[in-house]
């Protein structure tokens, strides 16, 4: 699978770009139309990890499960089409662990909330994400997904350096369509800023 490549001239991957180790270059997010189509097997999360039970909201506001899966959402689009405007959507990312601790697989999709649903405060016991992973698995199974490997987390390099995550190099599988999501599935989670470098600094009001 091709290596991920960023949205600006100074963040383009080359044949000599390392696929492992710390990376300050912003290799992700990229342009969906410049990513390779995923095979059906590549696009679907592990059935063993895509559990239907609840996770727990962590200190960052993400939902995490004992099996190592974590999900978060961005308050705006990150992976976009080149030469087009930024869609007014949120973007869900769920990171699934692999045998390589620094190389998770990130599955994601743009989303808008279904009519009558919203992202609420969440239950008092701090649980989250009941049916979120199984719903994501269904979305990934039917969407037209694009793939790239060995990217970076989508936060800017300064944030990744501060959190000690410059060396986290996810493989990305991102839907090219927008999902109408029951946003009650995100109850209790806190949205992150959305970083699409082609449009400038990160934003927190893009959905």
Image (cartoon, helix red, strand yellow):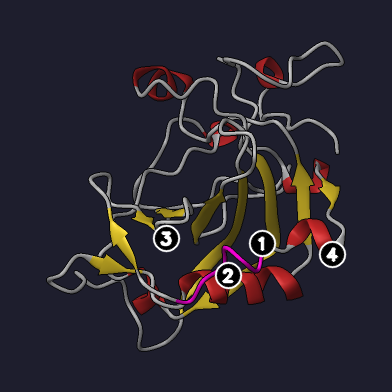
Q: Earlier in the sequence, mark 3 or mark 1?
A: 1
Q: Which residue is mark 1?
A: 45
Per the model, the C-alpha gap separating discs 3 and 1 is 25 Å
Which residue is situated farthest in the bottom direction here? 116
Q: Mark 1 and 2 residues: CB-CB less than 8 Å, in contact? A: yes
The answer to whether residue 57 is above or below residue 24 is below
Q: Quadrant of residue 57?
A: bottom left
Per the model, the C-alpha gap separating discs 1 and 4 is 10 Å
Q: Which residue is mark 3?
A: 207
Residue 40 has which mark? 4
Nearer to us of marks 3 and 4 is 4
Residue closer to the observer: 34 or 135? 135
Q: Quadrant of residue 108?
A: bottom right
Q: Quadrant of the N terminus?
A: top right
Tell me residue 15's x, y (percent). 87, 16
Per the model, the C-alpha gap separating discs 1 and 2 is 8 Å
Residue range of the region highlighted in magenta in the rendering = 45-52
Nearer to us of marks 1 and 2 is 1
Q: Main secondary structure of the magenta part?
A: loop
**Is residue 60 left or right of 143 when viewed as pictured?**
left
The answer to whether residue 69 is above or below residue 31 is below
Nearer to us of marks 3 and 1 is 1
The answer to whether residue 1 is above or below residue 10 is below
Tell me residue 171's x, y (percent). 68, 40
Secondary structure state at the residue bearing disc 2: helix
Whether 51 is among the magenta residues is yes
Q: Earlier in the sequence, mark 2 or mark 3?
A: 2
Residue closer to the observer: 100 or 120? 100
């Amino acid at each position: 699978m091709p290596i991920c490549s960023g949205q600006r001239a100074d963040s383009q991957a080359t044949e000599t770009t390392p696929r492992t180790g710390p990376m300050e270059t912003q290799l992700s997010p990229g342009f969906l139309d410049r990513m390779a189509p995923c095979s059906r097997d590549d696009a679907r999360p592990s059935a063993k990890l895509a559990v239907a039970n609840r996770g727990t909201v962590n200190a960052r506001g993400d939902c995490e499960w004992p099996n190592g899966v974590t999900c978060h959402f961005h308050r705006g689009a990150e992976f976009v089409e080149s030469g087009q405007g930024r869609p007014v959507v949120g973007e869900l990312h769920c990171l699934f662990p692999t045998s390589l601790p620094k190389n998770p697989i990130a599955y994601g999709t743009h989303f808008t909330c279904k009519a009558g649903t919203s992202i609420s405060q969440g239950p008092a016991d701090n649980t989250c994400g009941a049916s979120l992973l199984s719903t994501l698995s269904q979305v990934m199974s039917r969407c037209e997904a694009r793939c790239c490997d060995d990217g970076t987390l989508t936060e800017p390099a300064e944030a990744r350096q501060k959190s000690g995550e410059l060396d986290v190099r996810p493989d990305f599988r991102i839907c090219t369509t927008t999902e109408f999501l029951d946003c009650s599935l995100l109850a209790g989670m806190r949205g992150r800023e959305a970083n699409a470098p082609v449009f400038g600094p990160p934003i927190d009001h893009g959905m």
